[in-house]
Amino acid sequence: MRIHPPSPIGRRRGAEAAPADDRPPERADVVVIGAGLIGLSVAWRLAQGGLSVAVLERGRAGDGASLAATGMLAAAAEHEPGGDPLLPLAVASQRLWHGFRDELEAASGLGIDYRREGTLVVALGRDEVERLRFRHDLQVRAGLSAEWLGGPAVRAREPGLRPTVTAGLLCPDDHQVDPPRVMAALRAALRAAGGRLIEACPVAALDREGGRVVGVRTARGPVRAGTVVMAAGAWAGEGSLLPDLAVPVRPLKGQSLALSVTPRSGGLDHVVWTEQVHMAPKSDGTLVVGATVEECGFDPALTAGGLFALLEGARRALPGIEEMPVAGVWTGFRPTPDDDAPILGEAMPGLVLAVGHHRNGYLLAPVTAAALADLILRGALPPVAAPFGLARFALPAAGPEARA
């Protein structure tokens, strides 16, 4: 759900999106189910590899999580206890982003507002400093780039922050992009590579023959395919398409808002995280504040409590937001697996999964697209992606005592 301004490419002004096709083809080398960031990135790479690709989207491209996201590429700031298994994939993808950006902008002719100022994680008051030191120690042990800053050093970088900001971490490699611009660029790049995007075309069923997925059925007709890629985001776990295959992905709702920076209010240069919110300045003059974390299924409602928490969390760090007009408010649904890590690879013959990127979709898009291209074009996932198959969720075989 997205309120003010209504736009086919998202919450802020961006480059005009390329139009979608009207009808699906009768046959394609690859059908991708879902036209979010991950689906379009995978489809673009496969089309670049010479395959005929059709992307089928139940609504509008990006309307699940991709246009609701902030666009952070935050391998260091996102690293948490228990996150070591995901870290090699996150760091590998962060390193791919420069080349991914250059190729995408060249292929589409559109800019994506890639910003490299870095991310500041700040402590508000002495109670939060100890927790921030723990986070810094975790980053250092993991070999991530993160610099400890005292309060004056943080405020020298961001003078608009409150004096109660007593410490911070500078993560210089944690950059950001603008989601509406990335999505518009992916649509254009896909079309330039010969791929097709069909919106308002939900997939009703998978076609199978001899134990293999050989295509899909839609209200507009069937599509035969050598490979079907499931990239349906938070909807991948619903089970209607895969009744005999459990995909442990659920929607995790987030409410966010955008504020318009004014000369009177001032703004930010870096992405700034507190324990309550993150704030991301965009080049169009908006400041994105996100995001709540709510276990409430696919309820799209904007709530007073959610928006109050965002505004109050931002105001604790940046008092200038009181002078900023509200430019937009929206909700989205993070596609969240049981272990918060993506699910990549073959689920059954002819069916490949690229789902479950939780809050790291933008960070992980380049490595996911490259990994799925390796799998479909060359027959195997690269080693960095191999641990993230669906099989990791399988129950262990029962031992003799359990079977007794």
Image: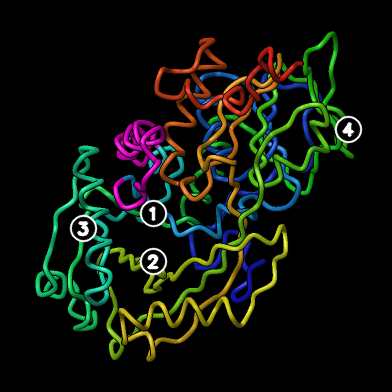
Name the residue rendered at 39%, 54% in the picture: 72
Could you give the CA–CA distance between mark 1 and mark 3, rounded to whole angstroms? 22 Å
Q: Quadrant of the N terminus?
A: bottom right
Task: Name the residue at 63% across, 21% down.
Answer: 396
Q: Residues within 10 Å of mark 1 (few under 14, many from 20)?
A: many
Closest to the observer: 302 or 245?
A: 245
Residue contact at pointers 2 and 1, CB within 8 angstroms: yes
Q: Quadrant of the C terminus?
A: top right
Give the crowd class for mark 2: few <14, some 14-19, many >=20 residues within 10 Å. Answer: many
Task: Indicate which disc, 2 or 3, sits on the residue closer to the N terminus.
Answer: 3
Q: Earlier in the sequence, mark 3 or mark 4?
A: 3
Q: Main secondary structure of the magenta part?
A: helix
Q: Is residue 54 visible?
A: yes
How far is the residue under mark 2 from the one under mark 4?
44 Å
Start and end of the magenta stretch?
76-103
Which is nearer the eye, 379 or 346?
Answer: 346
Residue corresponding to mark 1: 72
259 is higher (above) or lower (below) than 243: below
Answer with left or right where residue 324 lies relative to residue 51: left
The mark lying in front, picked from 2 and 4, is 2
Indicate the secondary structure of the residue bearing disc 1. Answer: strand
Q: Secondary structure at mark 4?
A: strand
Q: Nearer the viewer, mark 1 or mark 3?
A: 3
100 displayed left or right of 352:
left
| Label whose residue precedes the other's in the sequence (1 or 4) | 1
Q: In this picture, is 190 found above or below 325? A: above
